[in-house]
Image (cartoon, rainbow, N blue to C red):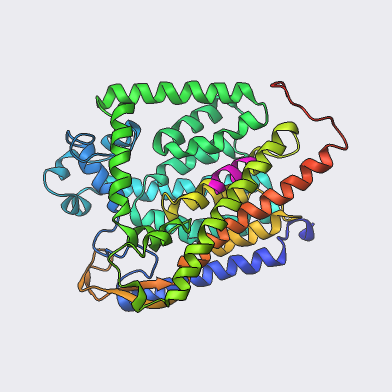
């Protein structure tokens, strides 16, 4: 009985490595007063995503002044979970005033961990503890918590939509609708239903998504598709000039290609040959991963039952994260899908990569920024240093490894499925 519930030895060791990395980050914070890279290097702007968005949830102008790219659900949610009187000044002042918002952030994190446990326990009791611990204490979720990103509120719905928490089509559709209305790129995992010819769940999810959008659009009175499209174009232009922010914690190598055009004195820290090698290798890595993912999805189309929903969703989402980075915290969705895989076959390298992506902290290579500022978390002056790290090169490679290992294993499964069932080319399952 003990052997049946004992996790694989490697997973136990990887979980302990994640715990050790959290302990090191805690020691770092206690001695220096700020969190190590790749946590937000503006140490005085903890919870920035939550309170900056909440500021505009409590006043007009979110779409025409602030130029937000968030769908209206974000502002409805924050309108309900913040104290309006705290937002007469700046978001910085609200951070110390709004106890309801801070409590909501903590409650959302607790809900994330509880639902992760439920999903992993329902999936495989042997691996539930190490996978829950790694996700709960891992860098992607802790980064999300420290930044106060609304992924904290979206993740429970994502787990309901794509994990083994409920069999109810209605609840899964509602979960999908919430995730897409918080983070529109999460429409990609939902497309796994189409590849598996699961038309009814896809239809329900689509209807729920549109209805939720229309209700929140009417509530806010702004955030139309045209406004979101226009603001997204503006955001892309803005982000292109924020190269360091993009490189600091990225899922993709794409931001590295922008560094030569940036104002950073890159050649002071990295040899020109290294830069040239990166510029040659990055497009190849991205394009080859995209082609492999497309080939896998095409193969899955003709054998819709050969692959699980989670596998297809992980490949689709992983290919997107390799192509461009919406932020390192988006890995929480990919890692959740990967850790639903059993510890066997081609999924093993992907699972190991998922644990490695949960390690907290980084290995500095060269200092680029030295600041003299305050730390909101420690409440004292700090002298943070940030720069190029090993993680800038290793983390995107691990995301690529996840896609390649899952895709190659998927192609082998589809090939074996052809021996048992004929290919399906029509729309019927």
Q: Among all residues in the image, which is located at the extreme left?
A: 89
Instruction: Please state the horizontal and vertical placement of residue 40, each as a whole percent of the image.
Output: 33, 62
Instruction: Please state the horizontal and vertical placement of residue 212, each as a whole percent of the image.
Output: 40, 25
What is the magenta range? 312-319
- Which of the image's four quarters has the N terminus? bottom right
Q: In which quarter of the image is residue 81?
A: top left
Q: Among all residues in the image, which is located at the extreme right?
A: 419
Instruction: Please state the horizontal and vertical placement of residue 54, each as a whole percent of the image.
Output: 25, 42
- Which of the image's four quarters has the C terminus? top right
Instruction: Please state the horizontal and vertical placement of residue 92, each as a whole percent of the image.
Output: 18, 54
Apparent side of residue 194 relative to residue 159 in the rendered image (left or right): right
Q: Is residue 133 visible?
A: no
Taking the magenta stretch, the answer to whether it contains residue 166 is no
Apparent side of residue 177 relative to residue 355 in the rendered image (left or right): left
Question: With respect to residue 271, does 69 lie above or below?
Answer: above
Q: In which quarter of the image is residue 190?
A: top right
Identify the residue at horizontal 73%, vertical 60% (top origin): 6
Q: How many labels does the image show?
A: 0
Identify the residue at horizontal 77%, vertical 41% (top origin): 414
What's the magenta bit mostly, secondary-structure-wise?
helix
Q: Is residue 219 visible?
A: yes
Identify the residue at horizontal 76%, vertical 55% (top origin): 345
């Amino acid at each position: 009985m003990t052997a049946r519930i004992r996790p694989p030895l490697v997973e136990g060791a990887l979980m302990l490595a994640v715990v050790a990395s959290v302990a090191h980050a805690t020691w770092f914070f206690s001695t220096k007063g700020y969190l190590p890279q790749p946590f937000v290097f503006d140490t005085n702007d903890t919870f920035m995503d939550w309170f900056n968005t909440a500021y505009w949830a409590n006043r007009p102008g979110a779409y025409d002044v602030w130029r937000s790219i968030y769908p209206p659900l974000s502002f409805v949610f924050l309108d309900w979970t913040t104290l309006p009187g705290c937002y007469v000044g700046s978001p910085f002042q609200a951070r110390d005033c709004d106890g309801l918002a801070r409590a909501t952030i903590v409650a959302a994190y607790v809900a994330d961990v509880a639902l992760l446990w439920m999903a992993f326990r329902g999936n495989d009791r042997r691996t539930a503890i190490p996978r829950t611990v790694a996700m709960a204490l891992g860098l992607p979720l802790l980064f999300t918590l420290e930044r106060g990103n609304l992924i904290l509120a979206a993740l429970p719905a994502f787990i309901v939509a794509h994990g083994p928490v409920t069999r109810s089509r209605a609840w899964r559709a509602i979960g999908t609708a919430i995730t897409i209305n918080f983070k529109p790129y999460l429409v990609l995992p939902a497309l796994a239903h189409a590849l598996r010819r699961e038309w009814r769940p896809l239809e329900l999810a689509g209807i729920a998504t549109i209805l939720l959008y229309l209700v929140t659009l009417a509530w806010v009175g702004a955030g139309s598709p045209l406004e979101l499209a226009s603001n997204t174009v503006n955001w892309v232009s803005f982000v292109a000039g924020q190269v360091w922010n993009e490189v600091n914690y990225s899922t993709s190598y794409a931001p590295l290609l922008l560094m030569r055009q940036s104002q950073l004195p890159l050649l002071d820290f990295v040899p020109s040959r290294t830069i040239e090698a990166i510029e040659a290798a990055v497009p190849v890595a991205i394009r080859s991963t995209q082609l492999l993912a497309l080939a896998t999805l095409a193969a899955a189309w003709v054998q819709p039952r050969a692959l699980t929903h989670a596998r297809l969703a992980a490949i689709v989402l992983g290919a997107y994260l390799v192509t461009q980075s919406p932020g390192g915290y988006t890995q929480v969705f990919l890692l959740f899908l990967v850790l639903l895989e059993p510890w066997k076959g081609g999924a093993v390298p992907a699972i190991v990569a998922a644990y490695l992506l949960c390690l907290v902290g980084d290995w500095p290579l060269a200092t680029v920024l030295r600041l003299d500022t305050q730390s909101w978390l420690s409440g004292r002056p700090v002298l943070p240093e940030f720069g190029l790290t090993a993680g800038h090169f290793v983390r995107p490679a691990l995301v690529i490894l996840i896609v390649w290992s899952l895709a190659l294993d998927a192609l082998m499964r589809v090939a074996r499925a052809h021996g048992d069932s004929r290919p399906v080319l029509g729309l019927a399952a």
